[in-house]
Image: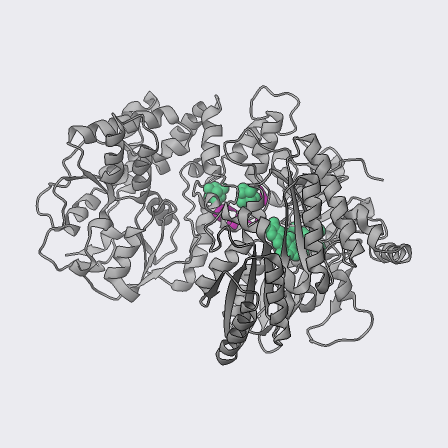
Amino acid sequence: MSSPKLTSGQRAVLRGLFPGDDYLERPEEACVYGADASRRFAQPWAVVRPRSLDQVRELLTWAHREAVPVFPRARGTNVVAGCVPQGGGVVVSCLAMNHLAIQEEDFTAEVGPGLVTGDFQRQVQARGLYYPPDPASVRFSTLGGNTATCAGGMRAVKYGVTRDYVLGIEAVLPGGEMIHTGSRTHKNVVGLDLTRLLVGSAGTLAFFTKLTLKLLPLPPAQASLMAGYPSLEAALIASRSVFRAGILPVAMELMPEEVLGCVAQAATPPWNAATKAVLLLKCDGRPDGLREELILVRRALEEGKPVFMEQGVDTLGEDRLWELRRLINPASFRLAPDKISEDVSLPRGRVAKAILGIREIAQKHNLPILTFGHLGDGNIHVNIMFDAAQEQQQTGARQARKAVLELVLHLGGVLSGEHGLGLTKREWLHRQVGPVERGLFSLIKRAFDPKGIMNPGKAY
Amino acid sequence: MFPANSAVPCPADTEALTRPCILCGKCLDTCPLFIATDREELSPRGKSMVMRQALEQKSLQPCSQKSLLNASASRKLLGLCLGCERCAQVCPQGRNLPEMLREVRADHPGWQSWLWRTWICRARQLWPFLGRCAGLLPKDIAQGPTEALRMLSRPHQVPGVFRRIARTVEFPRNAVLFPGCTARFVRPWWVDNARKMLGLKGNQLDRSLDWHCCGFTMAQAGLPHLLREMQARNVALWREQGRPALVTLCATCTKALRGYAASSSPFQDEEERLAWKAAVQPLSALLVPENYQAVGQTKIVYHQPCHTTDPDSDALFLRNSLGPRLFAESKNTCCGMGGMMQLSAPKLSKRVAAHYWGMVAGQEPSIVATGCSGCILQLAATAPQGTAVAHWLELLTE
Ligand SMILES: Cc1cc2nc3c(=O)[nH]c(=O)nc-3n(C[C@H](O)[C@H](O)[C@H](O)COP(=O)(O)OP(=O)(O)OC[C@H]3O[C@@H](n4cnc5c(N)ncnc54)[C@H](O)[C@@H]3O)c2cc1C
Ligand code: SF4
Ligand code: SF4
């Protein structure tokens, strides 16, 4: 069966440009490219898999001329339908563009957008270098996707997010023109900062073909601590004492009661029913410094009177603790088959208020709502679990979501700290961003993409 | 400006036995087929997507008229799986895709005739697996291409790597060899080496029993009737022999034989089922590494078959007897044999093998040793010049 929305001439062009398996139009082959981890779906008209810069340039020249929408796609792990081809168009998979060159002397690396972040981290670490951004999807998402979403991760408390590590971008604009933003230098104040603009642009401005990333020296030692508390309040007291002790941990994650029960269904965790909140911290540095820091952190954590504390010192021990954190997302589906997932961010001092407020919303709508996440930087994940087959639950979930987002905005927070607005949260944009700013967004979009063919309908 | 094609929630494959795919993408990184090709349509998530859409639209039934997916093309795509089960190990939803694919195949009426046709054309790769199931096969296959057999049975030329130094015998009193089709029909010297490895002089181990194929390929191919028939015959023979320990030479045989215990049908009662489960043992689990001495300087890389059962006694034996001379390859390397895929997509299968050899290249091995008949055939057929592929049994020297 052929793709219905492209003319036979257009299909012939694409087939010529992307020989063999690199052009797909059969629905059964193309369908997976119509969905992502948001679990939304629209059948693509066709899928192409460029292997070279020239192919991308020719593709975008053609698409611009013909006004055919293109949807950049990497591993499709974003949760906001950021690469669902709504409205139809050509999905462009960048997975075959996964080259890597490390410039050790410069503390930089040049990578293709399709390179898996975890693989990249392993390769730089083998040379004593460090790329800190670590979304929970680090093992199965890409640097291109991470850059386009400005992915954040657990280590953001100390090391920041993807944006802080992108020094430059080579990209192709609709029409086929290339741009090079930034450079291989770690400092650069020449002109407007297009690099930072493109990071987080969700595939709506340009197609990335090469990224220049900043690297750090690899901290030689690291360790993780998990502490369980008899109440949420106790955990928050402990977290405050850590910062008050003058310590900036690499990561500080919070898992309240609801989450603990859920993860326990999918693994054998160190907590029991008496544990009402868990803190998970990571510290790094030189072995001597780290040893001292851990003593201070333990002392600070003791202030909340923990019911248990576990330390992971080697990779395996640490991984065991962090795997529990990574399990939350998949384990959540054991509560109910459907989920609305929000990743709001709050001023750090308001996190407790938000968590308690969300608990009330859960009770009111009689639905399980999981709140957890990056306590250290105020980025809290909210998972509203429900069964879409039951109309009442579906309505309840939608209302609960609205209440959560309103609460967050009321507390001075933002709609998304990591995942972006994509398709699923786009209608909320105006609640946070004013009309003048939104007008600027549109003007910028038009400057890059006058015909609106790049990932249309997404993000802003 | 553009025609509507709006995003809708993905249909849930609620008819499936396991929880629905949540499209998280965790499985992508584990799938050797995806890793070797970067083609998402071949990934477990891609196949899950086709399955869920097919379930929604019932398009795998050939009579479906209005379906978006093409039935035969969907089936073909679903057939592109190596059956390695790596995706099943990481899926947070507990989905076992190869298992589900087996059912899709078994349910489809046209599948078996297609399979037999393909089998006749491409029996060369699969012949060793067919082995003694010949009596159960349609007539034209049963005759079998003898020329293919001769090709595969060319003598081995692998330098010896270890020698047996003990005079003891490590042979459980009541034990018998389940040689597997490859050793029986193609590489009979494996049986001889197995005897020597255990320190046996006579042929107590191999009672020349008329075993049937372990049935792994049948299961994967979605031929449950044939599989059940083989299970019944093998279990009956074992019972006749007084339920001895069953010593295996091939990782896939071990997995398949142990898998019999998942169903109760071939067994007389629960006690017999448990006895069977305990009876199946890989040869390497019986060996004592101290009884062997490494010889020569040859560099060995161990290839862990996808079907290895835990713990991997082959790897343990080799590591303990060869020490630092043994290099384990990095994880997640599949040879690309994948039983059925050899039939349906030989080119893709080769591509996975090429990826495998690319990964091993850095270690510059002169011998890649493994303990699975399927891997040996696939790797031997694709190895670069200068690299020999052998069953680890073949590394024994006098
Ligand atoms: C289990 C799980 C855990 C997660 N944890 C986190 C987390 O901790 N933090 C976090 O931030 N996110 C997280 N995510 C979301 C997701 O992993 C991130 O958004 C990730 O950055 C997406 O990467 P990807 O390679 O899958 O890109 P995709 O999902 O394929 O694409 C993401 C966006 O990038 C655009 N894009 C892709 N390639 C290009 C290109 N070459 N040029 C221009 N635009 C492009 C796409 O159009 C799309 O808008 C998680 C997801 C899952 C399933
Ligand atoms: S890991 Fe499981 S749930 Fe996730 S995409 Fe793969 S098959 Fe689907
Ligand atoms: S069984 Fe192996 S080859 Fe098949 S889909 Fe799963 S990981 Fe891929």
- Does A309 lie within the magenta span? no
Q: Above or below — where is B218 with respect to A262?
A: above
- Residue at (78% x, 63% y) in the render: A197
Viewer can see residue A194 = yes
- Residue at (63% x, 63% y) in the render: A236
Q: Which residue is outermost to the top?
A: B63
- Does B33 lie within the magenta span? yes
Q: Nearer the viewer, residue B344 or A166?
A: A166
Q: Dividing the picture into quarters, in which one does residue B317 lie?
A: bottom left
Image quadrant for the N terminus of chain B? top right
Q: Quadrant of ligand 2?
A: top right
Q: Above or below — where is A334 with respect to A59?
A: above
Q: Nearer the viewer, residue B45 or B66?
A: B45
Q: Left of B172 or right of it: where is A412?
A: right
- Residue at (70% x, 40% y) in the render: A365
Q: Predominant secondary structure in magenta? A: helix
Q: Dividing the picture into quarters, in which one does residue B180 lie?
A: top left
What scheme was used to colour the molecule?
one colour
Image quadrant for the C terminus of chain B? bottom left
Query: Could you say where residue A370 lies in the image, as x and y percent from the top left?
Result: 63, 48
- Residue at (11% x, 42% y) in the render: B173
Q: Which residue is outermost to the bottom?
A: A288
Q: Above or below — where is B341 with respect to A287?
A: above
Query: Could you say where residue A284 lies in the image, as x and y percent from the top left?
Result: 54, 72
Q: Left of A347 or right of it: where is A307?
A: left
Q: Nearer the viewer, residue A327 or B37?
A: A327
Viewer can see residue B148 = no
Query: Could you say where residue B293 lies in the image, as x and y percent from the top left?
Result: 18, 62
Q: In this figure, what is the number of numbered marks?
A: 0
Magenta span covers which residues?
Answer: B32-43
Query: Could you say where residue B268 lies in the image, as x and y percent from the top left?
Result: 25, 25
